[in-house]
Image (tube, rainbow, N blue to C red):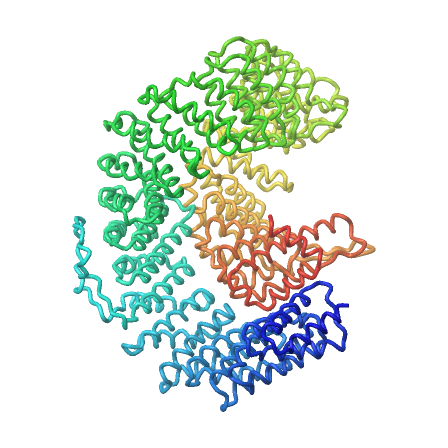
Amino acid sequence: MANLILTGILEKMTGKDKDYRYMATSDLLNELNKDGFKIDADLEAKLSNTVIQQLDDAAGDVSGLAVKCLAPLVKKIREQLVLEMTAKLCDKLLNGKEQNRDIASIALKTIVSEVPSSSVAQSVLVSISPKLIRGIVTPEMSSEIKCECLDILCEVLHKYGSLMVSDHEGLLNALLPQLNTNQASVRKKAVSSIASLASSLSDDFLARATAEVIRVLKNKGTKSEITRTNIQMIGALSRAVGYRFGPHLGDTVLILINYCKNASENDEELRENSLQALESLLLRCPRDISPYCIQILQLTLQCLSHDPNFTDNMEEDTDDESYAEEDDDESADEYTDDEDISWKVRRAAAKCLGALIVSRPEMLSRLYEEACPKLIDRFKEREENVKMDIFNTFIELLRQTGNFTKGQTTFDESRQVHPKYLLKQEVPKIVRSVNKQLREKSVKTKVGAFSVLKELVIVLPDCLADHIGSLTPGIEKALCEKSSTSNLKIEALVFTRLVLSSHDPFVFHPYIEAISSPIISAVGERYYKVTAEALRACGELLRVVRPTSEDNGFDFTPYVHNIYTTVMSRLTNQDQDQEVKECAISCMGLVVSAFGDHLGGELITCLPVLVDRMGNEITRLTAVKAFTVIAASPLHLDLSCVLEPVISELTAFLRKANRALRQATLASLNTLIVGYGNQIGSSAYEVIVAELSMLISDSDLHMASLALELCCTLMADNKKPGPTVGVTVRNRVLPQALTLVRSSLLQGQALLALQNFFAALVYSAHTSFDALLDSLLSTAKPNAQSSGVARQALFSIAQCVAVLCLSVDDQKCSSTINMLTGILKCDAATNSAKQHLSLLCLGEIGRRKDLSSHELIENIVIESFQSPFEEIKSAASYALGNIAVGNLPKYLPFILDKIDNQQKKQYLLLHSLKEVIVRQSVDKAEFDNSSVEKITSLLFNHCESEEEGVRNVVAECLGKIALIEPGKLVPALKERTSSPAAFIRATVVIAVKYSIVERHEKIDEILYTDMSSFLMLINDTDRHVRRAAVLALSTAAHNKPSLVKGLLPQLLPLLYDQTVIRKDLIRTVDLGPFKHTVDDGLELRKAAFECVDTLLDGCLDQVNPSSFIVPYLLSGLDDHYDVKMPCHLILSKLADKCPAAVLAVLDSLVEPLQKTISFRPKQDAVKQEVDRNEDMIRSALRGISSLNRISGGECSHKLKNLMNEIAKSQALSEKYSSIRNE
């Protein structure tokens, strides 16, 4: 049936009537697009011939439809017929009539793009390539035919260049001469074709193509237009092959610089092309172009002001801040010349400089010294598009400064070579120059000027304090002039908001009238984005108008009514954008919080509107936050008119699924109860408590901590009516709290909130201490659902018991301690869980309270050292140390004496001593001199212990006591770095590691001068010492980067050496039936790579990624599982932070990653090995994903092939997709 229909269509297609032919071709297109379309072999040839004939149809709409038919047709006919069609089309293109040439070209491109498989594509390419090449190289061919052939070839090479490897040489021979032909259109098409071919060329052919282009450029007799084409070719090649062009820069860059400098006065396009090529090279070959960066910088700065037809004395350049409005007909500084194209050179120079800024963060200081003043000076550029590019380049400089200096200290920024310091020196000049631009008539210029100011405030938040007065007229003009566009108003408002939020309020007071009036007017704008920004700026304005410190002497009352009325009109308007509604609610919250005491009766009008917004699902979250701000106001406003409905709404929100809403609701309730608890009824409290009980679980610890804090606020509020809250909390919340305390996930803020909850519960009425204590201790017992309680949960229970005991009188506390010591005296073998908890409880109570009144408690605890259970011994050690913290003079000598006299208990006693020292270092307490000497002497005596566990505890003790007495300990530790005993050297370095903590300590200044003595042990002969030094360096880089930054030039080569596999550390152990290989250097290599990973976070500016990636990271990617994992992390960080360095060696990194994801464990491998391998594959895929994100990575054939492999494997493809979505 289908064939009969098709026969009819084909007959009509060859008819004389144009309309019949059109309708028949349209019907054919519909048939071909049907999924179930099938055709007999006999009709195939007829159909393909007819469609080809239709391409020559005199009616353009018919031939256009015939082209559309080709796309589905080539997928449904035999390969032989496709080849015949392409042969006919090539013949039409090369030998046919001129009027049919275009349609033949389009038809060929359609077939090439739609061929169904790579095998058919291969056959098509074999068929058409020689014909296209003939069309290009035959001298008799017209330039139009050559252009069409080049156009088709460009499409073919772009899509199937990798399938034409055997033709690459012939294609190059055909295409390269076309760069030097006299026809401009042919040269232009040749550039595109060679660029498409280059992405699939081998390195040898790429070198040959580049050499030919450079040969032409070196020839002094070459015509200028051909020179321009070849320079464009260099830019196109670098864009096509990316980092692979790096090896050819030695010949290329200097030629480009010379052409740019020495071009004739009228040859602006040559300069432009040279700068565009240099821009491409800077972005795509950052490693190889490093030696030429300074020359390129000087060139771009020179070209940035290249304006031969315009000199500075042609404009009135004055720094006078006052100005008068110019008449519209004045055009003194509006020089125009339609033939002047020097602006193209300046634009290309600005973009080239931008590429230099983006790709060379290490040159920032130099850029500030040389480029920054030049850029600021060029803000006066007369060509608007060029001026926008100069603004964008300057913004890139500011952004790079912010990114590069992120996380650096104020001390770093005060150095005179630091980019931020250099930028601060330029601020007055920037403001003067920008102010001139804000006076310009052009809206585009003003938008760009505000963008510069906005970025400046983000990078240097407090830099405009002295310039507010000079900037105010520009802001006012931008917001008030009729010619101002929405874009300009938005940029001006964003800048104003940032300035208001980042500067001291008092600097604005002299100009508050001029600043506030346009902001308030902008709130009434029709365009919603302007209104929303104006409301945000208005919120910041309130902080300035009425700062929290009342003694500022500024009269804010004239602004109260105006601001309130303007914001209220927006708040009550329902017919507006969601963003405006939310901003109006937030702003009104701030208005009421700041001016509530001056609003009088208007407060009763606006508060119910905010309550109404709480009832609307799309505005309720914003309204809840607004009420939190109002309730926290220091004005303590009268909210009685809305308090009841607000509390009711908030209570209902605690049941909602929206986590952000519940979180905001808990904060709002807390604030309201603290401020207005006496006005809330007891029934409302009971409902709140019932809802809170549902939020207390370990599924969301943050929410649980907020709920517990609110419970504490409820019980602590003495102003509330009735004594029933404590009872309600006990009945509804306590069971949930007792369940939570058993969770092994409990920690941090949630644990602290839980401790405060138990203390508050004891203080409140109707709660018995004994009952509460019994309930807490009972949670440690195994129940029907679980076999026992996790170790972490026992610590949580013990801390809660301790807080509970300290919340009651001494008598009850003493009886509890007696009860706990009684448990310890029982048979240890039968009550191990009870004993464990009792010891932890005694330790937690002893840390907080002196237990010396309980005689011989230390002996009772030390008896538990004899227990057969390891966890009991550990708990006893912990308890003894913490009890000693409560009374050092009595218990510290006892511990020191036992360490000396009881060798068998030495390890446990050292742990007790560690608890004492750690608590003292955290609490900033000090030992007396005799104690310090005794402790240090004892610890140094045990530095050389054969047991690694003892050495580690000794090191931690030394490190923590060094925090308390750095003047004595650091010299003593330094002295032992030259000890002949390796264990002593390792122990003192680990001690230094423990002394480097995140918070500032007095040891930092002492360590700063002596750090090299410890870290240079990374070059020690003993591997244990080297590993200790690597760990110390890693800790310092994480916690105090400033301690090690100055040492990194010497340390990094030594650190990189530790990542290398050393054969002398690999040994074979004979286990009888089989032999086992042991790698003693594995832990050291793993630590070294993890250290590099840490350095990339805090000391990136000191690390030279290029020297590390090859050979060290490359070696690590092919190492043991434990080493590969950190290497994959390092690779991901480098790809994000230093893409240029990774791009330069991308091909070499692909092979070890490919090997990792292709590895399969043996069939008899245990589950642990299989799981480890799965983890490693996922880790490698994360690294591959980061490589794939690098701009320019698509130029790597090896990476392309790897991605194809991943796509073909279902398992790998699924894993990769899930990683991309993480």
* Residue placed most toward the observer, 965 or 592: 592
Image: 109 above or below 680: below
Task: Give the image location of residue 384, x and y in percent.
Answer: 30, 60
* Residue placed most toward the observer, 101 or 722: 101
User: Which residue is rendered at x = 47% and y = 35% of the image?
Assistant: 963
Split into 4 quadrants, where in the image is the N terminus? Answer: bottom right
Task: Give the image location of residue 882, x and y in percent.
Answer: 57, 25
Q: Quadrant of residue 1177?
A: bottom right
The furthest residue to the front: 17
Task: Give the image location of residue 751, x and y in percent.
Answer: 57, 27
* Residue placed most toward the observer, 69 or 1017: 69
Image: 228 above or below 1116: below
Image: 199 above or below 1016: below
**Is 616 on the left or on the right of 114, as rendered?**
left
Q: Is residue 892 in view from this perspective? A: no
Q: Is residue 1126 in view from this perspective? A: yes
Q: In which quarter of the image is residue 687?
A: top right
**Is 46 on the left or on the right of 615, as rendered?**
right
User: Which residue is rendered at x = 66% and y = 14% of the image?
Assistant: 819
**Is 890 on the left or on the right of 639, as rendered?**
right
The furthest residue to the right: 1073
Image: 848 above or below 959: above
**Is 894 on the left or on the right of 530, as rendered?**
right
* Residue placed most toward the observer, 992 or 1097: 1097
The furthest residue to the bottom: 140
Task: Give the image location of residue 1205, x and y in percent.
Answer: 67, 63
User: Which residue is rendered at x = 25% and y = 69% of the image?
Assistant: 337
